[in-house]
Amino acid sequence: MTRIALYLNQFFGQVGGEEMANVGPRFTGELVGPGRALATLLEPGEELVGTIICGDNYFADHTQQAAEECLGHTRLAQPDIFLAGPAFNAGRYGVACGVLCKRVQDELGITAVTAMYEENPGVDLYHSDVLIVQTGQNAATMRDVLATMLRLARKLRAGEPLGKPRDEGYFPRGILVAELAEKPAAERAIDMLLAKIAGRPFRTEVELPAFDPPPAPAPVKDLAHARVALVTDGGLVPLGNPDGIEISAATKFAAYSLADKDALDAADYDVSHGGYDNRYVKQDPNRLVPLDVARDVEREGKIGKLWDEFLTTTGLANPVNNSRRLGQGMAEHLLEAGVEAVILTST
Amino acid sequence: MTPVAEMVGSHRIVQGNGIVHPLGSAESSPEEERRLRRRIFEKALEALQTEVDKPTVFS
């Protein structure tokens, strides 16, 4: 009998949405969410013995504790295979899946597989440690993804060699495998170049990293005379969201005045962000855009001038290229305003 | 979420007090909460004035 355990977040585990993102780990022997689909994919001799569910915020805010508790549940369930997710493009969920798979395989010696979208931060953090199946951005392909996770987990557990990442559908782990090619590298490179010139499709053999961070900006020399701005990607907007900043995959940012304000008044603001429980920021927007303490610091002369507006957008499920474009737009806006330093608060 | 900030190449990173209120604390008294906010904000000011050459978490 091959025993299989599944890890899900509170949403896929059907505990609740963002308002339940703080629940700690729990174990259930019942089939929930993707577990139902998974059960139909099992072969004779395989059994889904249980599902561990944890809230995304609980895991992100108490990672060590959450992982320990999940490991405890896993030990008790005694699985042979541990599947986490799929997390698709959910960032906190993806990171939790990565953490757990790594620890489950390293510390408990159990075969572990997860799945997520290529821009999920969990991919960059864990692709070299954990087998991560490639998915689309959302749950439309759930069944196919689960089938791939199972197929690869069976191979891993049996000690069978895996095929190439792009043939098997997982993210490269940075493992080099020697093989005989039909043509030498020079000929393959020339073939690719000719294909490129002719506009024919070709596949590179060396994927470039997706992130290309700029060099570190120099420190601010004289903060007491510098103009400092507040920026957030937590979706804080004036009541009524006048510029229509989207709650997810935002296409724009906006600047709103802070002139003559000593603190942000909860009555004037709303949150346009579908990725975290907004109650606490709505109660007191200074918890996201810390105007009250920034004014104190300005009065005390520790910063020269707090810029008279804050910039805001929604950092959720946004393709990297789009986020980069928004960031460049913000930077240009701030440079024009003569801002020398930015404090960006993120949820 | 500081590992994510490091991974994407943010150079000066300060850990907030939770995803739902990076500069707040719903459980604390208003005075304590404001002191916490001030502490995190001042840490950010310290980071802005510090030379770094790679993603760095200030704690």
Image (tube, coloured by chain):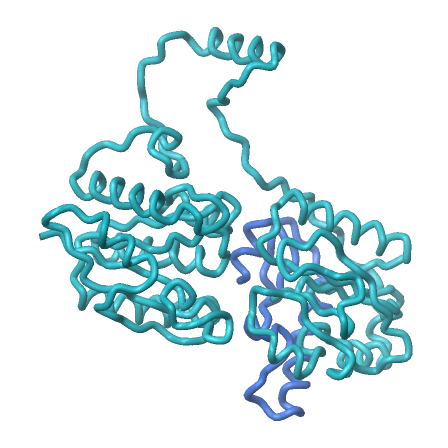
- Image-quadrant location for residue A53: bottom left
| Total marks in image | 0
**Residue at coordinates 68% horizontally, 66% vertically from top-left?**
A235
**Residue at coordinates 75% horizontally, 80% vertically from top-left?**
A293
- Taking the image as shown, residue A43 lies to the left or right of residue A25, namely left
- Image-quadrant location for residue A4: bottom left
Q: Is residue A151 above or below residue A30?
A: above
Is residue A51 or residue A16 the one in the foreground?
Answer: A16
Q: Position of residue A308 (x, y in %)?
A: 88, 69
Q: Is residue A170 visible?
A: yes
Q: Position of residue B6 (x, y in %)?
A: 56, 54
Is residue A239 or residue B23 the one in the foreground?
Answer: A239
Q: Is residue B38 visible?
A: no
**Residue at coordinates 71% horizontally, 64% vertically from top-left?**
A232
Q: Position of residue A61 (x, y in %)?
A: 48, 71
User: Which colour represents chain A?
Assistant: cyan
Q: Is residue A325 above or below residue A257?
A: above
The blue-tinted chain is B
- Taking the image as shown, residue B59 lies to the left or right of residue A128, namely right
Is residue A43 or residue A227 the one in the foreground?
Answer: A43
- Image-quadrant location for residue A169: top left
